[in-house]
Amino acid sequence: MAETQSRGLVFAGKKRGTGTDDFDGDDIFVAKKSMLPTMASESDPAAALANARHEFGEHGGVNMSIEASATFTVMEPETMRRMFAGELGPDRDFFIYSRHFNPTVLNLGRLMAALEGTEAAYCTASGMSAISSVLLQLCSSGGHVVASRTLYGGTHALLTHFFPRACNITTTFVDIGDLEAVKNAIVEGKTKVLYFESMSNPTLTVANIPALSRIGHEKGTTVVVDNTFAPMVLSPARLGADVVLHSISKFISGGADVIAGAVCGPASLVNSMMDLHQGALMLLGPTMNAKVAFELSERIPHLGLRMKEHCRRAMEYAIRMNKLGLKVIYPGLEDHPQHELLKSMANKEYGYGGLLCVDMETEERANRLMHHLQNYTQFGFMAVSLGYYETLMSCSGSSTSSEMNAEEKELAGISPGLVRMSIGYIGTLEQKWSQLEKALSRMRDGTLLIKN
């Protein structure tokens, strides 16, 4: 086996000998304390990623090898007992089964922990599996969650319908911008989680992460933040949050070809989620495929470059569309209610996010605009999801927020004609802007686009 090379202060990647299982007594306590590698925090996510351990291939390749095995062998019978007892683990290159830990998936976890500045991270088969597993680990039957009333539709359905029925976990939804309402909704001793999105789906409301984290901690709750809309742009853990979640399927993947998620947080939490008896990840088994993990680990190094271009174009389009009189929602615009808040929290040089919304007021007008943008000018695609190199468009009320009823959508500020656009970076900016302008000119009744 080629010698393992590493960079940084993470576990040195000690390999077992070829004849016997190689361990000494002192390191056993490290394994018991934490089965996951940890990552020191850097103020800039790009710097943190550059300092993360680099895994080389089995034969010295610059890219790590893919460990596609479902199960792993040991040289001595006693070793297996010690692994199941928690005395030996992946921190020292001892693996049991890929539903537990897999070297390739673990490497992606290191990168996600570096990206978000958390002690540890575990990658899952989808964003929803990451969300549900964390909440189930933190809340027992009879537990209570306080959550933003503006959330991704799937998350809203999980909290509104599935958890009360299947788990006896209830949720109080609040305006996350009303800090007093948030504080009043938390029941000390009962509320286990304060849950919100850093930048809400689809309304692009920006959460005051430092203030909300302080409130949550004062009340004894765990602060969980979905940062899917703003990787690189915002770092919730560095701003006070306890746990950061991602649908890696979106910006981090960038190719609209992978379904994946991540839980980033304290090593103690992530390890508890992998407990053989009580761990939500271990027992529910939303396992990421090692081949998927390899693909994603190759994309994260250029995430910063991609996000800068997504955000640059979104900003430019928002400014130009705003000048045309369109009802544009974008946190980079000075008239956005949380513009100054985002400026105060954002990592420098990454912009204000890669999504913008255009409020067409009615679903019919929204559909007509999207039809012209896709079928007449080829500006983008009518599709859900985000973070793709092509622009993706959807009418949120009838698609990704359709799980919410009319009253819930109204409270969340989701207009029937709200068009969410994930701005891509293919082609030149001027080329794509010309396509957007042509679609707008094709709209027969221009007054339908103009702000009141």
Image (spheres, rainbow, N blue to C red):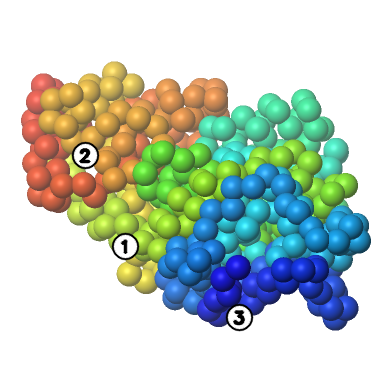
Q: Position of residue 389 (x, y in %)?
A: 29, 45
CA gap between label 1 and label 2 equals 29 Å
Q: Is residue 429 left or right of residue 383?
A: left
Q: Quadrant of residue 25?
A: bottom right
SS class, disc 2: loop
Numbered label attached to residue 145: none
The residue tagged 3 is 9
Q: Upstream in the sequence, badge 3 or badge 1?
A: 3
Displayed quadrant of residue 15: bottom right
SS state under label 1: helix
- The numbered mark, 1 or 2, whose residue comes first in the sequence reads 1
Residue bearing mark 2: 326
How packed is label 3: few (under 14 Cα within 10 Å), some, or many (20 or more)?
Answer: few
294 horizontally vs 268: left or right: left
Asked whether, in this view, residue 219 is left or right of residue 313, the answer is right
Residue linked to disc 1: 305
Q: Nearer the viewer, residue 116 or 222?
A: 116
Residue 218 is situated, as x and y percent measured from the top left of the image, at 74, 65
406 or 374: nearer the viewer: 374
Asked if labels 2 and 1 touch by Cβ distance under 8 angstroms, the answer is no
How far apart marks 3 and 1 lie (CA) works out to: 25 Å
Q: Residues within 10 Å of mark 1 (few under 14, many from 20)?
A: few
Q: Quadrant of the N terminus?
A: bottom right
